[in-house]
Image (cartoon, helix red, strand yellow):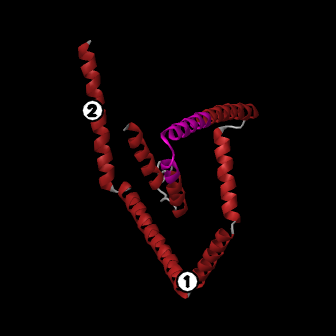
């Protein structure tokens, strides 16, 4: 009974294709035909032949997995060796990333797409600068800026002259004298308080 269920599972997998390797791609018609032929061939085998075929496949799978592990070990060793050599040469990860970025930017700038876009942008910019609307807007903004600077300049000079006039006025001198005498009184009072505390 166990052989029949295993055979049934094998046939289902064979008819559906091996979707475990790449789930995003559908099985091609050729792969489906091949799977159907394999399943039909497997179903035609005797129980002993099926067991022998399974044993062969298991051995081959073990050998392939061992080769994969060996390749992974060799790759890891080579990667470490390359890292050591780079370190000895002073090649850092940052330098590699920078070099890769610079090379990528160089490749992009040298590409025909980039150059055609750059030419299009230059043509567009030139057309905008030469357009009468742009020139009028530019002159309006320039004159507005000059007028604004003139207005602020006159406001600043007006405030400065008013402050100068206030400083020289009688009321400001009177305030200065009052503040000065109050300061002198506080100073004298602090001497008295210190003298009494001793």
SS assignment for the magenta stretch, majority: helix
Residue 40: where, in percent of width, then height? 49, 53
Viewer-closest of 18 and 125: 18
Asked if the magenta segment contains residue 40, the reply would be yes
Residue 81: where, in percent of width, then height? 71, 31
Q: Quadrant of the N terminus?
A: top left
In this picture, which residue range is highlighted in magenta? Answer: 39-64
Quarter of the view holding residue 162: bottom left
Farthest residue toward the top?
A: 198
Report the side of 4 relative to 33 (left or right): left
Q: Residues within 10 Å of mark 1 (few under 14, many from 20)?
A: few
Q: Secondary structure at mark 1?
A: helix
Q: Quadrant of the C terminus?
A: top left
Farthest residue toward the bottom?
A: 132
Report the side of 165 relative to 28 (left or right): left
- On residue 135, the disc is 1
Residue 39: where, in percent of width, then height? 49, 51
Residue 93 appears in the rendering: yes
In the image, is residue 82 above or below residue 151?
A: above
| Cα separation between marks 1 and 2 | 68 Å
Q: Secondary structure at mark 2?
A: helix
- On residue 178, the disc is none
Residue at the spot of label 2 = 185
Identity of the residue drawn at 55% across and 62% down: 30
Asked if the magenta segment contains residue 46, the reply would be yes
Q: Residues within 10 Å of mark 2 (few under 14, many from 20)?
A: few
In the image, is residue 145 above or below residue 3?
A: below
Identity of the residue drawn at 43% across and 44% down: 7
Residue 23 appears in the rendering: no
């Amino acid at each position: 009974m166990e052989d029949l269920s295993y055979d049934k599972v094998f046939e289902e997998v064979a008819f559906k294709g091996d979707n475990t390797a790449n789930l995003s791609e559908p099985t091609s018609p050729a792969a489906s035909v091949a799977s159907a032929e394999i399943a039909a061939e497997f179903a035609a085998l005797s129980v002993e032949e099926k067991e022998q075929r399974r044993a062969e496949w298991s051995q081959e799978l073990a050998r392939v997995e061992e080769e994969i592990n060996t390749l992974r070990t060799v790759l890891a060793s080579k990667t470490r060796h390359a890292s050591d050599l780079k370190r000895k040469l002073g090649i850092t990860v940052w330098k590699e990333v920078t070099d890769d970025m610079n090379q990528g930017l160089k490749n992009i700038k040298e590409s025909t797409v980039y150059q055609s876009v750059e030419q299009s942008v230059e043509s567009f910019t030139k057309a905008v600068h030469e357009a009468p609307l742009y020139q009028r807007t530019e002159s309006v903004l320039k004159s507005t800026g000059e007028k604004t600077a003139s207005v602020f300049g006159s406001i600043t000079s007006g405030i400065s002259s008013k402050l100068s006039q206030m400083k020289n006025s009688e009321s400001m001198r009177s305030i200065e004298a009052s503040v000065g005498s109050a300061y002198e009184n506080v100073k004298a009072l602090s001497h008295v308080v210190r003298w009494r505390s001793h």
